[in-house]
Each structure stands twice: as C-alpha cells, then as structure tokens.
Amino acid sequence: MPIYDKSPRPQEFAAVDLGSNSFHMVIARVVDGAMQIIGRLKQRVHLADGLGADNKLSEEAMERGLSCLSLFAERLQGFSPSSVCIVGTHTLRQAQNAADFLKRAEKVIPYPIEIISGNEEARLIFMGVEHTQPEKGRKLVIDIGGGSTELVIGENFEPRLVESRRMGCVSFAQLYFPGGVINKENFQRARMAAAQKLETLTWQYRIQGWNVAMGASGTIKAAHEVLLALGEKDGFITPERLDKLKSEVLKHRSFNALSLPGLSEERKAVFVPGLAILCGVFDALAIRELRLSDGALREGVLYEMEGRFRHQDVRSRTAKSLANQYNIDREQARRVLETTMQMYEQWQAQQPKLAHPQLEALLRWAAMLHEVGLNINHSGLHRHSAYILQHSDLPGFNQEQQMMMATLVRYHRKAVKLDDMPRFTLFKKKTVSAVNSAPSAGRITEQPTASDNHAADVAANNR
C-alpha cells in the first residue's frame, strides 16, 4: 500500500547577487525552521570591466550579464516573485545607464532587480555571516568584492558599525596594475591606497573592537585556499601569512603568468589587487587573524526573505528608529496610517489590477514617516521629509524602495507631476501616480495634531 506524505512542501527561496565580477545564485528551502542550501550557480560576467570612464556599462558587459540572467531564469522557473530576490551591487550602483540594463533584464528574467546601497550590502553580508558561522561574540566582517569593500562590526545579529568603501579587486587592477603587470611598486601603491581609504574609520573600528574577524567571498576565500595548498592547515589569514602570499605573488611578472597552488584560473586576473587590498585592511585595522566565513551577501538575502515570511522584518525596526530619531507625533502617525489604509483599500477595490503588495507596504511606512521633515521646517514639510527618506541610511530598504517612499511623501501635497517623478524599475509609474493621486496620507495631515512629541509607534501593529 503506497504511503502518501501529507506534509506541506518546504518553502523554497532563491537569492541572486549581481556582483561586479561574478553573478551568483543560491537556492534554499526551509525545513523545520532551518535553512538548507539545495543549489548554487555562479558565472563570471566581469561587469565592472565594462564600466567606462563615463560610468556607463558597455554593450558587451550588458550582454554578458543578460546571458547569465537568462541561464538563471531557466533554473528559477516555477518560483513565485515573493520567493526570489535579486540584488545589484557596486557596479550597478555606479553605472549611469543601469536603468537601461534593468529594463532589458525584465525581458530575460521575470523577477525585479533591486540595487542596494553599499551600507545595505554590508549589513546583509554581516547577517549572512551571523546566520552561518558558529563563532560567538562581537565580529568584524570583511568582504572584498570586485568594486567595493564592506566592513562591519556587530554582535548577536545587530550591526554596530557599517561601512562600504569604493575599492575592489577589479577597480584596483585597473588603477594600480595596468596591463596586469606585477611588481613591488604596483603592489605597495595599491596596499597604501587601500589603507588610506580606511583612515577615517580606523580608530572608530579599533575602539569598538571585536572578538573574532571573519572574511567572506572571493578574494578572502581565494587567499584561504592558497594558504591551505601551501601547507597552512587551518587556513587562517595572519599578517605573517599575508607576507608569505605577497612574496609568492611577486615572483611572477604578470597576472597571466601567475601560478599559485590552490588558485583557480578564473581568479588570476583579480587575485593580486584583492590581496593588496586585504593587506591594506590588515594594516589599517591591525588585524591579527582572519577566518573564512561560508556565508556572505547571498545567504544574508536568503535569511532576510525567510525572516519576512515570519514577520521578522528589519524594515519595521528601521522605521521605528527613524520615528524615534525625529520625534514623530505617535497619535498623529497612527491616525494617518489608519485613514490612509482605509482609503487605499477602497481605491484597491476600484483598481484591482493595480494592486502591488510591496507598494502597499511602502505606503504604510510612508504614511507613518511623512512628518520626519518637521524638525527642519513646517514650511515645505513634504519636500524635507522626502529628502530625509531618500538620503538616510535605512537598513532593510533598497535604493528604489527609499526613492518610492520619498516620492509618496513628496507628492502627498500639491499636484502629482509625472515629468518630475523618478524612473522606477520595480514599480510602474502608472501605479505610483494612481496611488499618489488618490486621497492619501497627506490630505489628512492638514488637521491639528496632538503634539505629544512621542516617537511614532511604527509597528502600529504593522496592520
């Protein structure tokens, strides 16, 4: 007699990281509350190599990226949009024509691409390390990517210091190793440049301190693997072992000639500049030992998605913190939120085809935070609030989500000007303008407020 398993199929999630050097995808499922990785895909696209002096991506770089996304799309067939998160990092942050790439990507992969800020990238990397590593105590987490380096100090899933610096193995290869030439002078220049880029944060990080230093992703993983192949069985990275790696590297004259045990062929072109950055980071922060982490950005994104399904959304904490910082009137914020959602539900009933769950969530936060600009001036409140929402460091929100909240707040008064509205890729302008044109939060804020100067209860039961 056949046995039928009536238990529900585990929820599957996919996280895609569009890095400056490689595109990565990881797929996982949640079983008994634990995340299980069931698949990984990686392809080198060298996106940063296609970023010209005018900060525009070349056609060739775009084609490489789109080809990789097409491959990922095949594996993601059947996944719901809420189970897939694609994030763009440094190169897409810098590219002036990133919107063109995202528009073309829509035709290749049916999931939105979120371009995240450097600090948000750093926070997610830290969360990926925290969720996957057994080490306890305060951690320093370092990730050297193709275009940027992220540094975080945190403990118990709470980042305390978060920084992203514009230095990566691809950009440093172009700046300090022209033609792929390896020599002592080029290496030292790159090392000093990396240390100098950290000067403004050095003492803050040293004073905060850490119990264990963890390194994530490509450059640090490559250094770890070379050290293992050279006989360092624990694979820990120390200043003395970095000197050993440097000596081995300087025996070669070019990237093409580079041959080290444990170093993959595809890593040759970026290993030396990445190593120089790592040496500079060790110099600046006086690191004595660095361990490799299995988790990084992609794992951080996965756990973030899984947490949202369990209503453990970091964005609620972020909104609450911002409300506290700007002393938002608690009762006024609650009234505006409740009335806004009543009106939104009526509008949604009339316009069911324009419904957008993510936009609804952002409308809630915009309603609760629309008065953050009062601390600047009541006159032009909508503009002041919009500026704060767009330019503040808001953990959990990507750049376009912040821009969306700013737009909702900016146009909660006066007429909606379509020509002045930012260009969105995650949201259709028709939907945004329709929501803003409907009676919304701002039409209510004209009423007198009870200025109790308490922080808004941003959770507001998160309705």
Image (tube, rainbow, N blue to C red):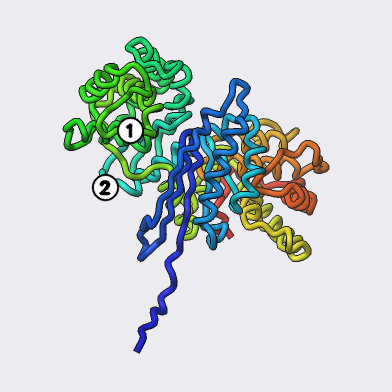
Marker count (numbered): 2
Report the Cα–Cα distance between label 2 and label 1. Answer: 19 Å
Q: State the SS at label 2.
A: loop
Residue 364: image location, x then y, percent: 63, 52
Q: Is residue 78 left or right of residue 135?
A: right
Among numbered discs 2 and 1, the one appearing first in the sequence:
2
Circle 1 is placed at which residue position? 220
Q: Is residue 281 visible?
A: no
Q: Is residue 86 left or right of residue 96?
A: left
Residue 458: image location, x then y, percent: 56, 50
Q: State the SS at label 1.
A: helix
Q: Closer to us: mark 2 or mark 1? A: 1
Q: Residue at x 72, y 35 (%)?
A: 383
Q: Is residue 201 above or below residue 47?
A: above
Residue 435: image location, x then y, percent: 74, 52
Report the residue that reaches farthest toward the front.
257
Q: Is residue 207 above or below residue 126?
A: above
Q: Residue at x 24, y 18 (%)?
A: 247
Q: Residue at x 39, y 23 (%)?
A: 273
The quadrant where residue 291 appears? top left
Kind of residue at badge 1 = Ile
Circle 2 is placed at which residue position? 134
Residue 265: image location, x then y, percent: 35, 33
Kind of residue at badge 2 = Pro
Crowd band around label 2 with a 10 angstrom C-alpha radius: few (<14), some (14–19), many (20+)? few
